[in-house]
Image (cartoon, helix red, strand yellow):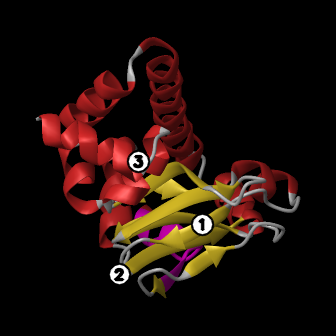
Amino acid sequence: MFTALIKNIQDLTACTNQETGQIIEFFSSIHFKKKQIVLEEGQVCKQHYFVENGLLRMYYINEKGVEHTTQFALENWWITDHMSFQKRLPSGFYIQAVESSSVSAISFDDQEHLLAKHPAMEKYFRIVYQRAYAANQFRIKYIYDLSKEEMYDTFASKNPEFVQRIPQYLLASFLGFTPEYLSKIRRKR
């Protein structure tokens, strides 16, 4: 386990094999079954998850009972409810394994100890957060600037692995439209 996380850390930092060995001690390995709920709305999110293999998603359910997917995480991506994780508040989101998934997980306290003991990890998490923030900026821009068809085309061209792996109804939820509308767009192609 931890192979992908070790490589990811070494790709973004100057950590040696010895140091990454010490870093990994702060993490635990967890396996989730397909469709398993990892976090429920109202629970405090106690872990930050790095996906070794598989696929997770974060979503919420609106007042009409409709699920809205806000984030996906596949191999080498991180996922958590940041507000709940950092502030230890009840989450407004669910996290679910879309596929059978193996993750490396770290608790808030362990992450704080890790950052204090291994300053290189400050840089690592800064880069991770910068990339996530940039991705969210583009998503917001696409929501405002693109038609639904353009949003799908842009997403599909930039993320072909998602389109292949994610069930159509979840992709539609993420892009902000119904599965039927997504089917209509795909039929036109």
The residue that label 1 is drawn on is 95
Q: Picture coordinates of residue 93 (x, y %)?
A: 70, 59
Q: Picture coordinates of residue 122 (x, y %)?
A: 60, 43
The residue that label 3 is drawn on is 172
The residue that label 2 is drawn on is 1
Callout 3 touching callout 2 (CB < 8 Å): no
In the displayed structure, 115 sits above or below 35; it is above
Quarter containing the N terminus: bottom left
Q: Amino acid at mark 2?
A: Met
Q: Nearer the viewer, mark 2 or mark 1?
A: 1
Q: Quadrant of residue 28?
A: bottom right
Secondary element at image label 1: strand
In the displayed structure, 188 sits above or below 22; it is above
- Magenta span covers which residues? 20-30
Q: Picture coordinates of residue 73 (x, y %)?
A: 43, 56
Q: Nearer the viewer, mark 3 or mark 1?
A: 3
Q: Indicate which disc, 3 or 2, sits on the residue closer to the N terminus.
A: 2
Direction from residue 151 to residue 154 in the image, left or right: left
Query: Which residue is drawn at the image coordinates 45% and 86% (left, top)?
Result: 31
Is residue 172 located in the magenta-colored stretch of the structure? no
